[in-house]
Image (spheres, grey):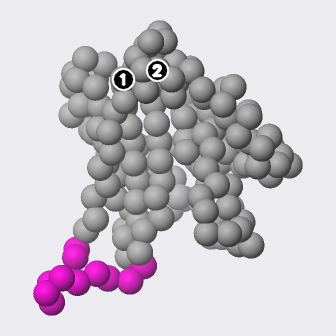
Amino acid sequence: MVPASLRTDDSDVSNRITMILANLATHIEDPIERLEIIRRSVQNSKQRFSRMTANEILNYSAVVYGPAGLNIASGMLPKRQAFNLVISNVPGLREPLYWNGAKLDALYPASIVMDGQALNITLTSYLDKLEVGLIACRNALPKMQNLLTHLEEEIQRFEQKIQELPQEKIVNS
């Protein structure tokens, strides 16, 4: 599940957020192709929501994600939901922050794992960096270090693939 902002530039100050069940393309070996499938999946969901009114989005979200919310609030519904992974991207600041003259070098995201979830991945940007925070259920992912190792390997693989792409393909993506 991916929380997604539906705000447009002409939106008022309130939040317009929904949840997307994104295709993570875990069956695809190539990281560039995998990212493209994920991007299309999220864009397709956002386009679907863009054709809905605020009330239609609210009703859709209540039907699709309501059981997860009720389970979190009451614990009465089955623990297994349609998803056990939440991935969130929070845009951060591009200007440095200071406190008493000391520059903040990094900003690490932290989130929570709700009942029935296995993993929460939160990304945030700060200056020119992308910071990643992972929180997991100890029972579902007892060896979190393995996941971190795989994540680091995949990031390196992705960076290598990006360097191999023609520059115009990167700019136009």
Q: Give the residue number, with chain letter if any, for mark 2.
A: 71
N-terminal label among 1 and 2: 2
Near mark 1 (Cα within 10 A), the count class, few <14, some 14-19 or many ≥20, is some
Residue 5: x and y, percent? 62, 55
Q: Give the residue number, with chain letter if any, for mark 1.
A: 115
Residue drawn at x 31%, y 19% is 140
Task: Look at the image and give the residue range highlighted in magenta.
Answer: 94-105
Choose top left, top right, bottom left or bottom right for residue 42.
top right
Residue 14: x and y, percent? 61, 62
Mark 2 secondary-structure assignment: helix
Q: Amino acid at mark 2?
A: Asn
Q: Is residue 38 left or right of residue 54?
A: left
Mark 1 secondary-structure assignment: loop
Report the Cα–Cα distance between label 1 and label 2.
Answer: 8 Å
Q: Give the total of numbered labels.
A: 2
Q: Amino acid at mark 1?
A: Asp
Residue drawn at x 28%, y 65% is 107
Q: Is residue 16 above or below residue 71?
A: below
